[in-house]
Image (spheres, helix red, strand yellow):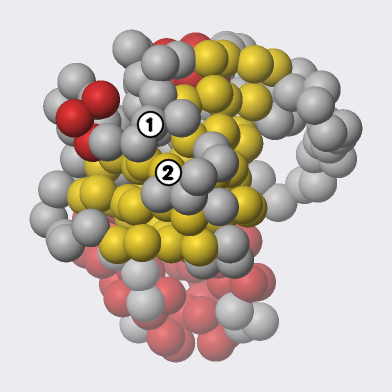
Amino acid sequence: MAGSDPKTLIRIARENGTEPPVAPLNLGERVRDLRKARGWTLEQAATQAGLARSTLSKIENGQMSPTYEALKKLAEGLAISVPQLFTPPSKAQVSGRMAVTKQGEGQGHATATYEHELLGGQLTRKQMLPYRARIRARDVEEFDGWVRHDGEEFLYVLTGVIRLYTEFYEPVDLRRGDSAYYDASMGHNVISLSEEDATILWVTSLV
């Protein structure tokens, strides 16, 4: 992704929306969820951790605060690290979010080298930034140095032929149906080799 300000789309996407509040972690519930996820009974989990069944039951029910030694045994028994005992699980509920962008209806962002069409723009707090790009540049000298930003990036060639330049690899030519997945903090630029402007689908991670 490049142009006069190649990070603009990514920065806007990251800042679009507020972060949800973080709920405090209940250690007892966390231990119970980890145990049930493994299909273990209290007896089985206690045996794995080398703890008394009654001790594990009290921990799960919030009736006692485990010592560090007990936490170590719990973590070893569950085959995780101690910090993971205090890491909230990923949200399992379905959000049901969806956005449809019809052809030509994406948000346009034109630069000297690329013409971007942002897809799914109505969704806030996205974890990916998808956009279609028309590659106007024909020479890497048209760019003001390397483009680099946080995250990972995926590109898929829709039409034409492109040349992908990266900081640590030899340039590679890609045609319709070809793709590349790379570390976006590594310098990168794309130019069109075909007579017509090539078009690609770009997806950038925002987490």
Residue underneath mark 1? 137
Label 2 or label 1, whichever comes before in sequence order: 1
118, above or below 74, in the image: above
**What secondary structure is found at the residue carrying circle 2?**
strand
Q: Nearer the viewer, residue 137 or 170?
A: 137
Q: For residue 128, which quarter of the picture?
A: top right
Can residue 108 be seen here? yes
The residue that mark 2 highlights is: 192
Residue 199 image position (x, y, % from top left): 58, 43
- Residue at 53% x, 15% y is 110
Give the class, few, some or many, for how many residues have Cα within 10 Å of label 1's Cα (few <14, many ≥20): many
Identify the amino acid type marked 2.
Ser
Q: Nearer the viewer, residue 9 or 207?
A: 9
Residue at the image position 40 percent from the left and 16 percent from the top: 112
Residues marked 2 and 1 touching at CB (< 8 Å): yes
Quadrant, the N terminus: top left
Q: Residue 194, how many percent across, how many down?
A: 48, 50
Residue 54's disc is none
Residue 203 can be seen in this image: no
Q: Quadrant of the C terminus?
A: top left
Which residue is drawn at the image coordinates 12% and 55% (left, top)? 168
Quick check: 74 above or below 59? below
Mark 2 closeness class: few <14, some 14–19, many ≥20 residues within 10 Å: many
